[in-house]
Amino acid sequence: MTTHRYTLEPYKTPKSRYTCPECGEPKKFTRYLDTETGEHLADHVGKCDREINCGYHFTPKHYFAANPTLKPGKAREPKPIPPPQKPDYIPKKMFEKSLNRTELNDFVEYLCSLFEPETVNELLEKYYIGTAKHWPHSTIWWQVDRKDNVRTGKIMLYDPYTGKRVKQPYAHVAWAHTLLKLPKYNLQQCFFGEHLISPGSKRIIAIVESEKTAVIAAGFMPEHTWVAAGSLEGLTYEKCRVLHGRQVMLVPDLDAYPKWEKKMNQLKAKMPGTRFGMGKFLQDLPPEEQTPGMDIADWLIASVRSSESV
């Protein structure tokens, strides 16, 4: 029988449970013990009991990977790396102020060409779509986490008639935390739409690349909870920890399927309690209907307009 040197501390009394470094809940965190010495590893090495609502699990393997010289038998023992710092947040006043200027928003004008006013208003309220002053009529995509904290906001400019990003004479992309010049801001991004991931809900979580795609897909397919990774590289384990125990459908842009399938397999290995799958709406299209870089919003819009013209 194989025995492990490092195990989660067995429950004895409430004093054998600690405050989780991730969610801050007291008496929900189990620390790892060294069975040979009877001592705990570092304060942040352990597992939160709230597997669905938190999912934090920092193992001895992760700890020694970050601190290889602390493994037993090593001669030199430098100071251990401190536990991860908590993220900083955007002031709520700045966030709330941006939500009152949607009549000046070019992306909102484009949404009005796709949906009825009632649906547009629902999407604006649901996704906290804001309007920035950095560029006239620009959109700000707020990243609001499951505790309603505002991590940051991505500011982008769109053509009100085509819905395409304005890339000339340069790509119009900026970040709220940078423009506010907040000192030593500890940015930890989350999914755009993370605040919509309700504990206990059985709705499929559909993840796309861009914020614009998530909003449009939510308008056409409201039966799913649509969130955005923010970019091709934005699908990370750190963001996905909020998905523990859920059913997740990845819907990347057409040319990103191979990369996200590889990422999906990595996430499956790290999150065995989460059911990941690929939404192959675009891959299943006839070749003549596929265009480079298309996403599910392009397909949904084209499908609706095609049916209207018949």
Image (cartoon, grey):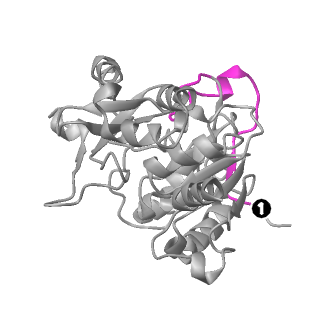
Residue 17: percent from left, percent from top: 65, 28
> Left or right of 281: which side holds 136?
left
Q: Is residue 67 magenta?
A: no
Q: Amino acid at mark 1?
A: Thr
Point 70% across, 38% down: residue? 52
In front here: 139 or 120?
A: 120
Quarter holding the C terminus? bottom right
Residue 204: percent from left, percent from top: 72, 46
Q: Is residue 4 magenta?
A: yes
Point 44% across, 64% down: residue? 232
Residue neighbourhood size for the residue with mark 1, other residues' Cα within 10 Å, grouped as few (<14), some (14–19), many (≥20): few
Quarter holding the N terminus? bottom right
Residue 46 at least partly seen: no
Point 13% across, 61% down: residue? 169
> Left or right of 70: which side holds 259?
right
Helix, strand or loop status at disc 1 = loop
Residue 236: percent from left, percent from top: 49, 57
Residue 165: percent from left, percent from top: 31, 55
Span of residues in magenta: 3-26
Residue 161 at least partly seen: yes
Which residue extends farthest right? 1
Q: Main secondary structure of the magenta part?
A: loop
For residue 198, above or below residue 206:
above
Which residue extends farthest bottom? 287
Point 57% across, 73% down: residue? 257
For residue 249, above or below residue 18:
below
Q: How many marks?
A: 1
**Figure quadrant of residue 128:** top left
> Left or right of 144: which side holds 18?
right
Residue for badge 1: 3
